[in-house]
Image (cartoon, rainbow, N blue to C red):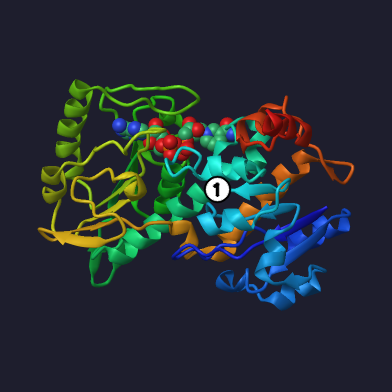
Amino acid sequence: LIVGVVAETGAGETRVALVPAAAARLIASGMQVVVERGAGQASLIGDDQYLAAGAPVVDRAEAWRSKVVVKVAPPSEGEVAQLAAGSTLIGFLSPRSADNRIAALEAAGVTAFAMEAIPRISRAQTMDALSSQANVAGYKAVVLAASLCTRFFPMLTTAAGTVRPARLLVLGVGVAGLQALATAKRLGARATGYDVRPEVADQVRSVGAQWLDLGIAAEGEGGYARALDDAEREAQQKALETAIMGFDVVITTALVPGRAAPRLVTAAAARGMKPGSVIVDLAGESGGNCELTEPGETVRRDGVIIASPLNLPATMPEHASELYTKNVTSLLELLITDGALDPDFSDQIVAESCVARARPMAEAASEGAR
Ligand code: NAD
């Protein structure tokens, strides 16, 4: 079984789907791994490191013709065309996006597993790439906020005076939000968390942060939030307008599956913060949680800095790739039996993450004859 590691071609993408140490482990377990020339370069991993791990470095076309292709970001149209019929693709594939990429994969006879479609169940924790990458984003959001902020995060008692700790609020405490709170605590800020899922309160307290209760509960299915109705949204925005004024830094991460990001922070709320305060909006890719957010940009409005970085995990390619590799190899282990690719489609993880399934040759041929 040949596993091909291909180079990422998306703008700003620096991660690689399989790091050399994991390639060596797959090879030791009887697989072959080939790596597209330069695939690790943006993650500061040289071709020589893959060679030393026992993985030949090959040209682009050969890597894409592997039986199993692993990558990070969704393939472009041209990349789909490079996949061989009967091959398997593993990566973030944006199965909900409307660009017909999944249909194209199926038409090309490719079976595809989307990392973002892996169910969030205990047995799949090691494969949960949404979580591993959200951890990176949550951490980096706070580090970014600290560097943009004109104030210290920790309390300082010095001969020149005492500095009060920064007050930081996280809106949306999923995986990224919880990591943001924990990181803010480590930097010495006074951290507060808010979410519409009341069960999150204990998790917020467990990292030493305070819980902000606005009295709005909106639990949805599968551990996610549901969208608020108009009255709830208005009440939430109003309550947050008052609450936010007291904070130096706001990190927003709120998402609802399949929807545009909820607007939590109105323009008035953002402008109501003290000049020099910072908002880091992690929901920019889904439109943003703040009305003043410009996805991918850092703007200043009435002295308040609003940053909406896209693809933060790609700013930390070393660890982001290492964690993603663990997710991908855990899924591979589930798909492989006795050295052969043999997905058990009755397994919940396999069934839910499989977003394109090549039909058996006989079935496709008989349909073609019809
Ligand atoms: P997410 O990225 O979908 O959303 C981030 C947060 O935004 C969520 O906590 C959500 O409740 C919150 N949110 C949505 N709308 C909001 C609003 N209007 N106001 C305030 N907050 C709002 O979430 P995620 O990080 O992917 O995590 C979702 C859940 O899945 C969490 O409960 C997490 O613990 C759980 N999870 C479970 C497992 C597992 O059991 N293996 C693994 C990972 C995550």
Q: Residue at x 35, y 34 (%)?
A: 259
Residue 114 shows up from this direction = no
Give x and y (percent) for residue 69.
68, 54
Question: For the residue marked with disc 1, what is the amino acid?
Answer: Phe
Left of 341 or right of it: where is 279? left
Q: Quadrant for the C terminus, please.
A: top right
Q: Residue furthest front?
A: 370
Describe residue 124's horizontal placement relative to residue 234 as left or right.
right
Count the numbered circles shown. Answer: 1
Query: Looking at the image, is 364 positioned above or below residue 304?
Result: above
Horizontal relation, residue 235 to residue 130: left or right:
left
The residue that appears at 46% across and 22% down in the rendered structure is 221
Query: Which quarter of the figure has residue 325?
Result: bottom right
Where residue 229 appears, x then y in whole percent?
24, 22
Q: Is residue 260 above or below residue 62?
A: above
> Ligand 1 shows up in which quadrant of the image?
top left
Residue that label 1 marks: 92
Q: Is residue 94 left or right of residue 214?
A: right
Percent of width and height locating residue 52: 80, 74
Q: Secondary structure at mark 1?
A: loop
The quadrant holding residue 334 is top right
The answer to whether residue 297 is seen in the rendering is: yes
Q: Nearer the viewer, residue 271 or 75?
A: 75
The residue sitting at 72% across, 45% down in the picture is: 330
Note whether 289 is above or below 195 in the view shown. Answer: below
Q: Who is closer to the viewer here, 202 or 288?
A: 288
Q: Is mark 1 within 8 Å of ligand 1?
A: no
Q: 299 or 339, which lies in front?
A: 339
Q: Is residue 183 above or below residue 37?
A: above
Q: Residues within 10 Å of mark 1 (few under 14, many from 20)?
A: many
